[in-house]
Image (spheres, rainbow, N blue to C red):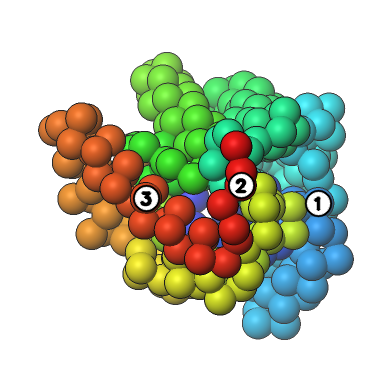
Amino acid sequence: MALRTFRDAVAILTGGASGIGAALARALARRGALVVLADRQLELAQELAASVAAGGGSAEAAALDVRDAAAVEALIADVWRRHGRLDYLFNNAGIGVGGEAREYQPEDWRDVIEINLIGVANGVQAAYRRMVDQGFGHIVNTASMSGLMPSPFTVSYGAAKHGVVGLSRSLRAEATRYGVRVSVLCPGVIRTPILVGPGRFGRMTKPIDEQTQRTMMERFRPMDSDLFAAKALSQIAANKEIVVVPAWWKAIWWLNRLSPALGTALAARGFEHMKQTADGVVPRAHS
C-alpha cells in the first residue's frame, strides 16, 4: 500500500464539476486515476463523469456541499469503504464575492469563509485520519495567489485563502511523520467561466457587465485551465509544498515576501485601476 501517482489512484475532488476542478478531474483521469467529482452542481458533475468515461477514464459523480461536515464525512467514508483506499483529496470547492469591502453584507463574509476555508477544514477532518491510518495520501488544498498577497476588491476571498495557505503549511509540518503529503495550490488568474460572470454561486456586490469583467481580468493574462491542471499535477507529483501557476506569478509572490509594504502599495494601485474600470459602468455611490 503506497501512494499512486497517478495510475490507479483514488482521488476525491470537491468543486469538481466546473472551472479548475473540472480541468484537474480531466487531467487526473487522463493519467489513470479514478476521480470522484463532488459538487453541489450534481447534474454538471454527472455530465463531466460521463464525458470522462466516454474518453476511457474513470469518474464518479456525487452531490456535496462542503459546508456540511457530516456530508463530507459520509462521502469520504463511502469512497474509502468501496475502494479500500484514498490517495488524493483535492479540497477545491470555492466561491468569490467581488466588490469593495465597504459594500459587503454579513452573508458575503460568511459564504466565502464557510466554503473556502471551513469547507477545506471539513475535508481535512474526514480524510486526514484515514490517510494516517493507511500510511499514505496527499491532501491538495486550492488557495490562490490571493492567499500569498493582498487582495483588494475580493477582501473576504483573500482572507479565506490566506487561511487555506496557513492551514496547509501547518498540516504539512505535522503530516510528514505519518507519510501523508500536503500541498497548496496558489493559481494566478485562470481562464474559467467565472471570468465571464459572477459564477454559479459567487457574485459581485453590485452589477458589473460581462465585458467590463473581461476587461478587468484579461489584464492579468489568464491561463487556460487545462494547461494549468497539467502543470499543477506535475508539481503535485513532485510533492511541492506551494504550487504557483502560471510561473510568472512567482515574481509577485517573491516581491511580497521581500517587501510586504511594497506589495501592499502595488495592490492599492491595482485596486484604483479596478475601481476606475468598474465605476465606468456603475455610478459611484453617494455618501
Q: Which residue is mark 2?
A: 285
Proximity of marks 2 and 3: CB atoms separated by less than 8 Å: no
Q: Which residue is mark 3?
A: 272
User: Mark 1 or mark 2: which comes first in sequence?
Assistant: 1
Q: Secondary structure at mark 2?
A: loop
Task: Please state, as top left, top right, bottom left or bottom right, where the C terminus lies in the image.
Answer: top right
Q: Quadrant of residue 283?
A: bottom right
Q: Is the residue marked by circle 1 packed among few (<14), some (14-19), or many (20+) residues within 10 Å?
A: some
Q: Identify the residue at horizontal 78%, vertical 27% (top origin).
A: 69
Residue 136, how many percent across, how many down?
A: 50, 33
Q: Identify the residue at horizontal 31%, vertical 43% (top origin).
A: 267
Residue 194 to residue 168: above or below: below
Q: Nearer the viewer, mark 3 or mark 1?
A: 3
Determine the residue located farthest toward the front in the rendered image: 286
Q: Is the residue marked by circle 2 packed among few (<14), some (14-19), or many (20+) residues within 10 Å?
A: few
Q: Identify the residue at horizontal 73%, vertical 46% (top origin).
A: 83
